[in-house]
């Protein structure tokens, strides 16, 4: 048995407490965990190991929260990050369960966010979105739900519309080649790409023709 001889708040982090056993520093703990201890209390080796395990779990939880702060993540992404910290599998499982219970980790919400974000800023084909979400470790059943309302033609149209001004001075052949290749690289099929490219070409030049008519050029 080792005896707790002092409990002192860390100078640089008042949310952590240094634990001293038999007159020497032993380990640090979160203040909430340290609050369950008292000076003079005896600790067995198993109890010490348990306290250190709780500390490792809390630090892993806080690390996961920081990881989630930049953007939503899938459960698999958080699990991979935590696994790189040399934590035991049981500790990783505990952090994942804790995050899910607190509502910080939700693969369904993550998949909806990912698809919505792509649709708004970088539209891609459902097939490409499916591949991206699989790489994030999202289950197929959740991916299917997230993609059920995605319209390939509408997504391709908006993706092409965002690029159209880059190619507006090209002739029709080069316009089709450049814009078509761009859309194909984003996973859209030929059956979607070429009608959309034709539509965008027509809309681009219909606008130009109307301008020429208004200025008396036609």
Image: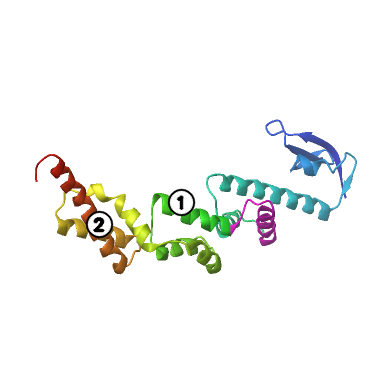
Could you classify mark 1 by the number of other residues whose Cα lies within 10 Å: few (under 14), some (14-19), or many (20 or more)?
Answer: few
Is residue 92 a member of the stretch shown in magenta? Answer: yes
State which region is magenta.
89-107
Q: Which mark is residue 117?
A: 1
Q: Residue at x 47, y 62 (%)?
A: 149
Q: Residue at x 42, y 64 (%)?
A: 126
Residue in front for this viewpoint, 130 or 48:
130
The picture places residue 181, in percent across and down from the top left corner, at 26, 60
Kind of element beneath mark 2? helix
Which of marks 1 and 2 precedes in the sequence? 1
The picture places residue 80, in percent across and down from the top left corner, at 56, 58
Residue in front for this viewpoint, 47 or 136:
136
Is residue 216 a member of the stretch shown in magenta? Answer: no
Depicted 193 relative to depicted 24: above or below: below
- 97 lies left or right of 180: right
The picture places residue 21, in percent across and down from the top left corner, at 82, 42
Depicted 197 relative to depicted 6: above or below: below
Q: Residue at x 16, y 48 (%)?
A: 209
User: Mark 2 highlights which residue?
Assistant: 179
Q: Quadrant of residue 151?
A: bottom left
Depicted 37 relative to depicted 77: above or below: above
């Amino acid at each position: 048995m080792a005896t707790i001889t002092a409990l002192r708040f860390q100078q640089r982090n008042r949310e952590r407490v240094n634990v001293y056993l038999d007159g020497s520093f032993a380990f640090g703990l979160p203040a909430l965990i340290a609050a369950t201890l008292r000076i003079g209390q005896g600790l067995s080796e198993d109890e010490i190991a348990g306290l250190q395990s709780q500390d490792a779990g809390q630090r892993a939880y806080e690390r996961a929260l920081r990881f989630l702060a930049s953007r939503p993540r899938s459960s698999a992404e958080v699990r991979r990050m935590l696994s790189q910290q040399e934590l035991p599998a049981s500790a990783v499982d505990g952090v994942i369960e804790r995050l899910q219970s607190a509502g910080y980790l939700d693969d369904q919400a993550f998949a909806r966010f990912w698809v919505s974000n792509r649709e708004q800023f970088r539209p891609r084909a459902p097939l490409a979105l499916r591949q991206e979400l699989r790489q994030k470790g999202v289950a197929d059943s959740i991916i299917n739900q997230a993609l059920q309302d995605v319209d390939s033609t509408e997504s391709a149209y908006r993706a092409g519309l965002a690029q159209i001004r880059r190619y507006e001075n090209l002739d029709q052949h080069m316009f089709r080649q450049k814009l078509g290749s761009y859309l194909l690289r984003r996973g859209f099929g030929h059956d979607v790409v070429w009608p959309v490219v034709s539509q965008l070409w027509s809309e681009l030049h219909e606008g130009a023709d109307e301008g020429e008519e208004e200025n008396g050029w036609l």
